[in-house]
Image (cartoon, grey):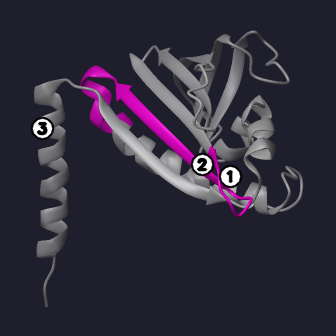
Amino acid sequence: MHIGPTPSMKRSWLELVQIRAELLARDDDVRIDVATILDAPAERVWEEVRKPAALDHVASPLQAFVPIDPAVPPARWETGRYLYRLMLFERIPIGTQYIGIEFPPDRGDGVLRMRDNGSGDRIRMWDHMIELTPRADGRTDYRDTVEIHAGLGTFTAWLFAQFFYRHRQRRWRALAARGFDYGSGAA
């Protein structure tokens, strides 16, 4: 009987250690690109993406955003910087983060874009672009592209973000399937 990690588990951990060593050696930014299809028209998804309440919903229960400045978030994101306390699993404080909302100029490609050019006390750069592309079938291609720079914490932030953005997109799909009803059913 074999006791301990299997050869494939050893290889997986070794690969993660190697990735972490490479990131630390470079002290570079990392990039994440995750996409999904939402069963709703792009204009309708755009209305929801622009609501801070949608961020709260899709991040839950993995993370909560508690507003600091302003103390009450706007009903709809506008260009500006918003300071939040981040709560892991909605209970454990893990730092503060500026959400820097920008709306890039229209490129004439029909894609709706919102950027969070964020930074915080633990992460120097959290540059998140949301892109919504209308599909011919009336649905929406939804894409999160994120660049992260957190110094020695970059690898940890990258691992968290890999899980976090997939979680968000699962929650977005469920929310769209319910007609953006935030109150009925758990996603």
Residue drawn at point x = 62 percent, y = 46 percent: 133
Near-viewer residue (143 or 135): 135
Which callout, 3 or 1, points to the residue nearer the camera? 1
Per the image, is 148 magenta?
yes
Mark 1 residue crowding within 10 angstroms, few (<14) / some (14–19) / many (20+): many
Task: Please report whichever mark, 2 or 1, sits nearer to the chain's N-terminal start.
Answer: 2
Residue at (69, 36) in percent of width and height: 55
Q: Quadrant of the C terminus?
A: bottom right
Horizontal relation, residue 32 to residue 174: left or right: left
Residue 27 showing in the rendered view: yes
Circle 3 residue: 21
Which of the two discs, 3 and 1, labels the residue nearer the N terminus?
A: 3
Please identify the quadrant where the N terminus is shown. bottom left
Q: Eyeballing the image, is 25 above or below 165?
A: above
The residues colored magenta run 133-157
Quickly name the residue at label 1.
172
What residue type is disc 3 on?
Ala
Expressed as whole percent of the image width and height from the top left, the position of residue 117 reads: 51, 19
The circle drawn on residue 142 is 2
In the image, 70: left or right of 183? left
For marks 3 and 1, give the CA distance: 34 Å
> Amino acid type of disc 2?
Tyr
Q: Position of residue 143 (x, y in %)?
A: 54, 45
Q: Give SS at disc 2.
A: strand
Q: Position of residue 48 (x, y in %)?
A: 78, 39
